[in-house]
Image (spheres, helix red, strand yellow):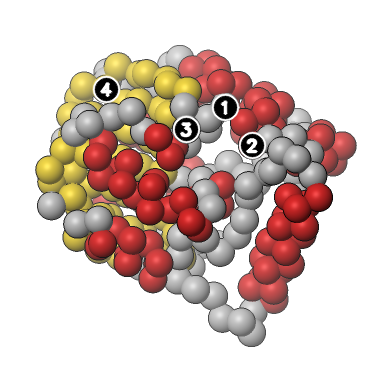
């Protein structure tokens, strides 16, 4: 499950007993060697749906982590690519990881809360990968509103999610069990560590985006194995 350079179980336990921000500060130096990092095959297949190199002006990656998606966004953008994340440690790692990334767009790294994006009509593209589990369901409308505000008219929000899994699949119950354990942990231990599975799946994501005025397209069958269950969503701001 983990690379030999990845975190130990003790380090993961220490991360889980702190806040999301501090936990990822701790994890940042080893994050590239964990299964939490979105695979390049998924990023490449999804971002390819946005167009040819140089076809957009500027792009924002929300909850950018160590900058994996920014590496694929930079050749796409002519002007700038901004990485936005709660963890300064992850941003510092992203800056280092992307020092020699292909492309000419300026790279910017901004620390902040994804529920309070400080942008107004600034981007042609917004992306987010592997982050929705850190957003509580009741906060998802705020996230969508912030992304809509950050986009120019006609701008696109790209992300990867899935359709609701069958309750007959073992993975469904494993995810439910993990969520139950996290809710118990957060009831007993402060600060909370928000990380849940089965969040922002296609039906709810579509409903929230359409309520905010987006036109939503769900593209299935684009991902290589073993990620074929994933859906690529492109939501266009009207």
At mark 2, the secondary structure is helix
Along the polypeptide, which appears first: circle 4 or circle 1?
A: 4
Label placed on residue 80: 4
For the residues labelled 3 and 2, the Cα–Cα distance comes to 11 Å
- Left or right, 112 with reference to 13: left
Q: Residue at x 47, y 23 (%)?
A: 111
Q: Is residue 105 visible?
A: yes
Name which quarter of the figure residue 14 lies in. Answer: top right
For the residues labelled 1 and 3, the Cα–Cα distance comes to 9 Å
For the residues labelled 1 and 2, the Cα–Cα distance comes to 8 Å
- Which residue lies under the disc numbered 3? 113
- Left or right, 182 with reference to 202: right
Camera-side mark, 1 or 3: 3
At mark 3, the secondary structure is loop
- Which residue lies under the disc numbered 2? 20
At mark 4, the secondary structure is strand
- Which residue lies under the disc numbered 1? 87
């Amino acid at each position: 499950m983990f690379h030999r350079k990845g975190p130990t179980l003790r380090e993961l336990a220490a991360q889980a007993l702190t806040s999301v921000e501090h936990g990822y500060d701790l994890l940042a130096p080893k994050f590239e060697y964990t299964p939490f990092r979105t695979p390049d095959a998924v990023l490449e297949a999804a971002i390819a749906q946005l167009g040819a190199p140089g076809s957009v002006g500027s792009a924002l990656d929300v909850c950018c982590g160590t900058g994996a998606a920014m590496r694929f966004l930079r050749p796409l953008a002519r002007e700038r690519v901004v990485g936005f994340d709660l963890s300064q440690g992850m941003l510092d790692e992203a800056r280092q990881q992307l020092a020699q990334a292909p492309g000419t767009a300026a790279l910017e790294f901004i620390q902040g809360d994804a529920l309070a994006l400080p942008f107004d009509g600034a981007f042609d593209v917004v992306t987010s990968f592997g982050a929705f589990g850190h957003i509580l369901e009741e906060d998802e409308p705020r996230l969508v509103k912030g992304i809509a505000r950050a986009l120019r008219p006609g701008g696109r929000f790209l992300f990867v999610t899935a359709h609701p899994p069958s309750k007959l699949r073992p993975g469904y119950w494993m995810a439910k069990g993990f969520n139950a354990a996290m809710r118990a942990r957060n009831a007993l231990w402060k600060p909370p560590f928000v990380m849940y599975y089965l969040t922002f799946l296609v039906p709810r994501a579509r409903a929230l985006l359409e309520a905010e005025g987006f036109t939503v397209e769900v593209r299935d069958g684009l991902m290589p194995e073993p990620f074929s269950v994933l859906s690529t969503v492109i939501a266009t701001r009207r």
